[in-house]
Image (cartoon, rainbow, N blue to C red):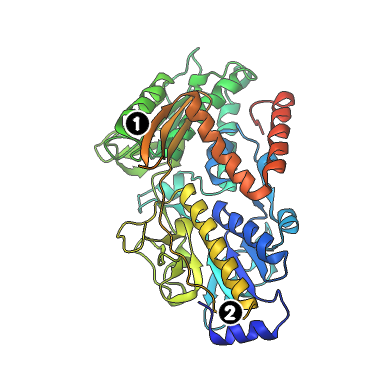
Amino acid sequence: MVSTHQTARLAQEPAGDFRIVIVGGGAGGLELATKLGERLGRRGLARIILVDANPTHLWKPLLHEVAAGTLNSYQDELGYLGHAKHHGYRFQFGRMEGLDRARRQIILAAMTDDKGEEVVGRRRLDYDLLVLAVGSISNDFGTPGVREHARFLDSRLEAEILHRDLLILLAGRVDGATPDAGPDQDSQTAPGGIPSIGVAIVGGGATGVELAAELHQAMEDLSRYAAPVKAGTLQITVLEAADRILSPLPERLAFNVSEALRHLNIAVLTKAKVASMDAESVHLADGRTIPAKIKVWAAGIKAPAFLREIDGLESHRNGQLLVRSTLQTTRDDAIFAFGDCAWCPQSPGSDLPVPARAQAAHQEAELLAKSLVRHVEALHACRQPPPLPTYSYSDFGSLISLSRYTAAGTLMGGVFRKSYLIEGWFARLAYISLYRMHQMALHGIWRTLILILTNRLQRMTQPSLKMH
């Protein structure tokens, strides 16, 4: 994995000058940086550097709550610099745009201010081992009008922009104000005669379904502050091109979720392939038109474009970097990739890829942390590094939360990996525990308990909805 000249350099240079650079501070990348910082950085065995284009971290599965306003992102965010100081790694603010494998350097893009003027030029960052964990972005499949008229949930900034869009449209429904009638006025009305706002969510996976329920919950909360806004002020439609929503879930659970959404007056349209979008509507391939002022695309993902065959690395047709079961890229043993940006076999020799799920990134981060710690420790002890262990994906189930209404999913466990169907409050508790496990991986159990207590106290003193 590490060349002979690197091993020699490590023996000559002071401890800690061996550089492991991790690009991407999402769930997997941040967990890896935390573990390596504590096990290598604090001991002076290596310099761990985390690179991200944002100064703060927010768990991506929470973005639909940020968009709806039911979560204040500023309270749940984690600042990389402060976290790095406490966990033995360093943080570099910047966006990777290139790779120089010959010099073992990554290239960071220039940084500009809000006027577009360059304030920090392009930079190069040396590495001995490089780990790419840059996640994924939405895939619009080239559908006409999507990039111009739809919102995405790839980042906190995009979620906050969607929230702002909703607040602006709702402003005309507060304190009895109603939009001036005109030829383009939507004829739909919410309960009480208030004009409704069409919301179309494209994609019946976890993100789309959870966002739909969260928006409905947000309207219920807002109605307590801003009459005459009602829960039905948003006319929400979930559009799914397949035969049913939530394909990872058993059919019975997916049906129950569909019924729960319909009970909330959220329309669920299956076999509804989007042909195009414009400013006011979503046009389906079968000729139907769905009026929608707000359009959200949650119907597929792909790797960031800059990764495609970057400096000769092999990539899949969807842009993911091809990696072996050791999580090493196929053409460079000193470069690793994992999470949504990597095409990794589910087990050695398998033709099936690891699914793009948070639990997979967590598993891969744990394995890679153990691999790299053992490797660096062996180098410092002047021993032959042991072979890297291989990764095999373990599916622990899927969970879907419909805000505070209900939840459903499957849990897998036991000797025979039996699947258990769960619904209701127990499923909701299991869903919440996923975030708490992520927090414990980053902060430890005691700080996580303090965060839980702080969150409870904030809910007692602050509005349930972020309205700015």
Is residue 422 placed above or below 86 in the rendered structure? Answer: above
Q: Residue 40 in the image: state x and y as whole percent.
A: 67, 66
Residue type at mark 1?
Ala
Say whether residue 148 is visible: yes
- Please determine whether, in this image, residue 140 is positioned above or below residue 22: above
Residue labelled with disc 1: 254
Could you say where residue 208 lies in the image, as x and y percent from the top left?
Answer: 43, 37
**Figure quadrant of residue 114:** bottom right
**425 over 201 or under it: above or below:** above
Q: Which element is circle 2 on?
A: loop
Mark 1 or mark 2: which comes first in sequence? 1
- SS of the residue at dot 1? helix
**In terms of depth relative to the viewer, which is nearer, 284 or 256?**
256
Furthest residue toward top: 192
**Residue at mark 1 to residue at mark 2: CA–CA distance:** 53 Å
10 Å crowding of disc 1: few (<14), some (14-19), many (20+): some
Which residue corresponds to the image point at 31% horizontal and 64% vertical from the top-left?
A: 349
Could you tell whether 373 is left or right of 336 in the image? right
Q: Residues within 10 Å of mark 2 (few under 14, many from 20)?
A: few
Q: Which residue is mark 2?
A: 383
Instruction: Residue 48 in the image: state x and y as whole percent.
Output: 66, 67
The amino acid beneath tag 2 is Arg
If the image is split into quadrants, where does the C terminus sit? top right
Labels 1 and 2 touching (C-beta < 8 A): no
